[in-house]
Amino acid sequence: MAETLTFQKVLDHLLDSKKDIPRGHLQLYSDLDPKSLRLFSDVWSSVKPDRKLLLLDQLVAYLDEDTIANFESIGNVLLDDADGEVRARAIQLLAESNDPKLVGKLTNILLTDTLPAPRIEATHLLGEFIVLGELEELKEELQRKAEDALLAVIRNDNEDATLRKFALEAVGYSSRPDIATTVIESAFKRADPTWVASALRAMGRSHDDHWNDDVVSMLLDDDPRIRFAAVEAAGELSIESAGPILLQMLEEEEEDDDVVAAAIWSLSQVGGDDARIYLVNLIEKTEDEDVVEFLEDALVNLDFLQELNKFDLLSLDDLDDEDKDESEEADEKE
């Protein structure tokens, strides 16, 4: 009879650095009750640093594979860990969290932490909280707090340039007019291509068609970093006029593999009959199974978005009909 695997045994195994961490152990770290979380906290200080990072990297990877897994309790506990790399991975474990209390903790890490890794991870998650604010699922003052912290980093010339660019990309989710007219435009006009690329990512995340012309103007830029960011933004903004240019890039055999993959996915977001025909033909010509799987996912995405757009149009038509009926009823009463 197989021996029952308890969480205490999982923790005992974690302490033994000579042993691999079995995949089957990872699920037992999910949804810890208060007692199990205390056990984890008591043991953690005795785990060797490399072993800690090994476990956390495996938990982060597991989150991508198992949508039911939840390591938020561990993530919250480790936000104050003495090791900056542990703090960074703790934030990654909180990637799916919508707990408003995190906004204060993340802004504190962003503005006061002494190491770059946790600060960079904080920018990413603060961007997700701005999205929640835009969806009216987060209080306005908390959204403003996240935005202001990111803006403070962006505007500080003494800050690390990489961190500032990530902050710019994260704040792109905001619909605040002053963000568009100051930080994004300012970054886009810089001579440094890495800043231009970050500005383009922010444009894509804004879902504001105000940026369409700027994005399209950079699709064929000489710098692959700019092309890549522009291609992604064109897809996120669903810019129809970008479709023919994306097809041109692919048919003329774009040399950068990342740009090619981004162009294919963006085509699925932009949609259209030409994009569908191109993807179907490409699938028929491709022998690499991984590439075929990616192309098929892109085709599924294209069909899904087109159906979604049709549904949205039908909904608008229904609303127009209701307005007409109400108007006619009002006229009859008069």
Image (spheres, helix red, strand yellow):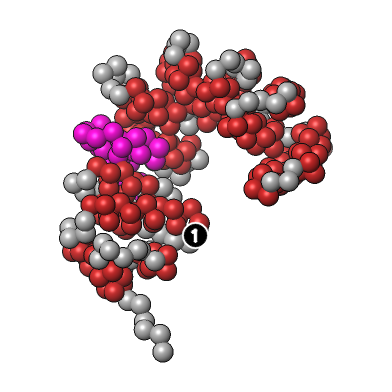
Between 265 and 148, the one nearer to me in the picture: 265
Q: Quadrant of the N terminus?
A: bottom left
Instruction: Examine the image and state in which quarter residue 38 appears.
Output: bottom left
Please report the bounds of the magenta region as a residue range: 99-125
Res 240 seen here:
no
Which residue is located at x 25 percent, y 31 percent?
111
Magenta-span inclusion, residue 69: no
Res 137 seen here:
yes
Q: Position of residue 163 (x, y in %)?
A: 34, 28
Count of labels in the image:
1
- Amino acid type at image mark 1: Asp
Residue occupied by mark 1: 66
Element at label 1: loop
Which residue is located at x 33 percent, y 47 percent?
89
Instruction: Examine the image and state in which quarter residue 323 appears.
Output: top right
Q: Is residue 286 above or below residue 236?
A: below
Q: Is residue 74 left or right of residue 60?
A: left
Q: Is residue 7 left or right of residue 172?
A: left
Which residue is located at x 50 percent, y 22 percent?
197
Q: Position of residue 141 (x, y in %)?
A: 35, 35
Between 16 and 317, the one nearer to me in the picture: 16
Q: Given the current orientation, which residue lies at the most extreme bottom position?
A: 1
Q: Position of residue 132 (x, y in %)?
A: 46, 41
